Image (tube, rainbow, N blue to C red):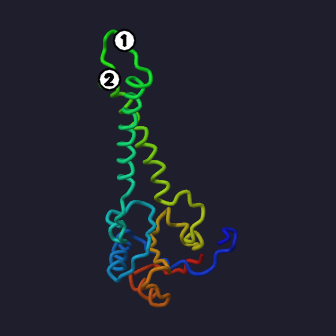
């Protein structure tokens, strides 16, 4: 598909709410109704919202742990290889494999790889940077960073039917339901 081609079609329907409690209640009811492809947009964190929309994947922590262990093993292995195999020098009768001297570098390698994975893994797993998203086409969405709360049910959801979904979202005490065009 050509990335320069104009985006057409319906991305989904977006309901606007005035309070976080209304959004959380609507998200719980929407998930209970069987909708799974949805997202919420708020100007502040709303406790319990991630669970309400069915977000349960947390792979950043696993990736950071894996990177940290890789840094730990890699740092220790590099120092062992340097001092024992590649450039072995017996200085003052000390043992060739003096592991206590490796601890600072091993720790630093662990922290470095963990921090890099946390930053780049978070960006990659969140699909960032994302300069364009269809929800930006809704004029009211400009208030998502100020004082409004939005719940968007995507058109790719198996239960999505434009009219039935619009009626469902309107019944959830939403301020307004808007079409989100691609």
Residue 13's tag is none
Q: CA distance from mark 1 to mark 2?
A: 12 Å
In the image, 89 versus 140, the foreground residue is 89
Instruction: Provide residue 176's location: percent of width, then percent of height.
Output: 49, 80
Query: How many dots with numbers?
Result: 2
The residue to which callout 2 is attached is 97
In the image, 177 versus 114, the foreground residue is 114
The residue to which callout 1 is attached is 91
Side of 141 where 28 appears, left or right: left
Residue at the far bottom in the pictured view: 163
Residue 91 higher or lower than 40, as above or below = above
In the image, 42 versus 80, the foreground residue is 80
Name the residue located 33 percent from the left edge and 20 percent from the top edge. Answer: 96
Residue at the far front in the pictured view: 85
Q: Residues within 10 Å of mark 1 (few under 14, many from 20)?
A: few
Residue at the far top in the pictured view: 92
User: Dividing the image into 4 quarters, which one contains the N terminus?
Assistant: bottom right
Residue 159 higher or lower than 73, as above or below = below
- Residue 137 falls in which quadrant of the image? bottom right
Instruction: Provide residue 18's location: percent of width, then percent of height.
Output: 43, 72
Residue 6 higher or lower than 47, as above or below = below
Name the residue located 60 percent from the left edge and 81 percent from the top edge. Answer: 9
User: First in sequence: mark 1 or mark 2?
Assistant: 1
Instruction: Provide residue 29's location: percent of width, then percent of height.
Output: 33, 79
Q: Are marks 1 and 2 in contact (CB under 8 Å)?
A: no
Instruction: Provide residue 36's location: percent of width, then percent of height.
Output: 39, 76
Name the residue located 37 percent from the left edge and 28 percent from the top edge. Answer: 80
SS at mark 2 in the image = loop
SS at mark 1 in the image = loop
In the image, 88 versus 182, the foreground residue is 88
Q: Residues within 10 Å of mark 2 (few under 14, many from 20)?
A: some
Side of 141 where 53 appears, left or right: left
């Amino acid at each position: 598909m050509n990335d320069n081609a104009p985006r057409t079609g319906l991305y989904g329907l977006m309901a606007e709410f005035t309070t976080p409690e209304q959004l959380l209640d609507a998200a719980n009811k929407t998930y209970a109704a069987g909708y799974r492809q949805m997202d919420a947009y708020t100007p502040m964190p709303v406790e319990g919202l991630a669970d309400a929309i069915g977000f349960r994947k947390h792979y950043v922590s696993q990736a950071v742990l894996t990177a940290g262990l890789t840094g730990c093993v890699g740092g220790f292995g590099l120092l062992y290889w340097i001092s024992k195999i590649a450039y072995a020098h017996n200085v003052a009768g000390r043992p060739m494999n003096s592991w206590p001297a490796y601890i600072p570098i091993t720790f630093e390698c662990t922290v470095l790889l963990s921090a890099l994975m946390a930053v780049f893994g978070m960006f990659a797993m969140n699909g960032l940077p994302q300069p364009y998203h269809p929800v930006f086409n809704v004029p009211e969405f400009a208030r998502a960073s100020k004082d409004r709360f939005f719940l968007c049910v995507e058109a790719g959801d198996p239960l999505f039917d434009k009219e039935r979904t619009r009626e469902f979202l309107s019944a959830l005490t939403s301020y307004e339901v808007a079409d989100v065009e691609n």
